[in-house]
Amino acid sequence: MVEQPANVDAAVNTPVVVDSNNDGTVAQELELEHMRSTLEEAIVETRSTPLENRPRLPRIALSKRSRAVVRALNPMLVTYLEASRDLCETDSILFGAALAVCRIIGAKVSTAGRTTGHSSAIPAWRRRIEERIAKARALIGRLICFRSGNNRPRIVRTVRMAFAGTNVSLSQPDITQKLTERIDDLKQRIAAWGKWIRRYTERSTRFNQNRLFQSDQKRLYESLERPMVSGTGPAPNQADTVAFWRGLWSEPVNHSEGPWTEVVASQCAGITPMDPVIITPDDVAEAVRRAPNWKSPGLDGLHHYWLKGFMPTGVTLK
């Protein structure tokens, strides 16, 4: 049983006001209670899930139902976001809220995690062609052995099967020419089958890249830059990573400071420092407003659409 934080209980008891003609009906109260419980479960679940194991959020239709659910969850998110301690916790809350919306409206959410590997399934027709190529190459090897004078029973039996139904006898004078013609025919067949597979592979690659460009440009560019890199390896140890970067940036280093540094310091002494930058909720809202809704998200898997839909986010992110 996971211990619930204090802000979860406060959020569950937060009243929600929904503009409707039947505001006090039992059906609406039950629906709001269902939304609260779904939101709470999603946030608690997301907090205990690593980034790489989060489900992939789908693109939802911009329907009245989905917008109404987002508006109804906005007041419930206020308590969670006000109690957020850092940006990571805020991101976890927003992802949990987005996951809750998908579950409430019945959108299909992948539970297998946001993997980047592609399916290795080979089409049945391609497997059949590859089997034909393998058999043809084996037959070419047997025919070459027979033409070189190898008369073992297994080789002879294979050659007879290769000329079955062609009225070609192994004892006729021009058998060497017939063997050469048969070998050339098999080589041409192998070349044609290979071109079929090559054309299919090129067309499939173009199709998948075009589709990936429409849905997730980041993954497309990563696949083009590092086509052989796989994300299935072990993750680096956190302690070793912290120690490595701490050794680079936290250890004091004695630099050789020449006379030119004093000249630059005297020249910059009269420069007026820049006024501190104050980021307001309007600045955050304007920056988010211009961002595309469903472009490929970052490592957290959260699309810009959810930053626009959840209104209390601007106050927390400023």
Image (cartoon, rainbow, N blue to C red):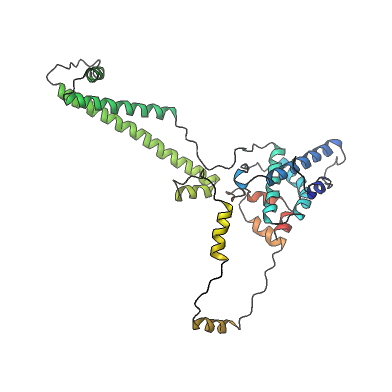
Residue 155 lies, in percent from the top left, at: 23, 20
Q: Nearer the viewer, residue 111 or 310?
A: 111
Residue 96 lies, in percent from the top left, at: 70, 45
The residue under the point 37% across, 34% down is 197
The furthest residue to the right: 24
Q: Which of 136 and 192 is in front in this view?
A: 136
39 over 132 or under it: above or below: below
Residue 275 in the figure: left or right of residue 114:
right
259 over 62 or under it: above or below: below
150 over 38 or under it: above or below: above
Residue 214 lies, in percent from the top left, at: 53, 45
294 over 316 or under it: above or below: above
Q: Specify the quadrant that holds the N terminus.
A: top right
Which of the 4 quarters of the picture holds residue 243? bottom right
Residue 174 lies, in percent from the top left, at: 13, 21
Residue 30 in the figure: left or right of residue 191:
right
Task: Count every numbered label the image shows and give the total.
Answer: 0
Q: Specify the quadrant that holds the C terminus.
A: bottom right
Which of the 4 quarters of the picture holds residue 72? top right
Residue 301 in the figure: left or right of residue 177:
right
Residue 154 in the figure: left or right of residue 117:
left
Q: Nearer the viewer, residue 301 or 246?
A: 246
The residue under the point 72% across, 60% down is 281
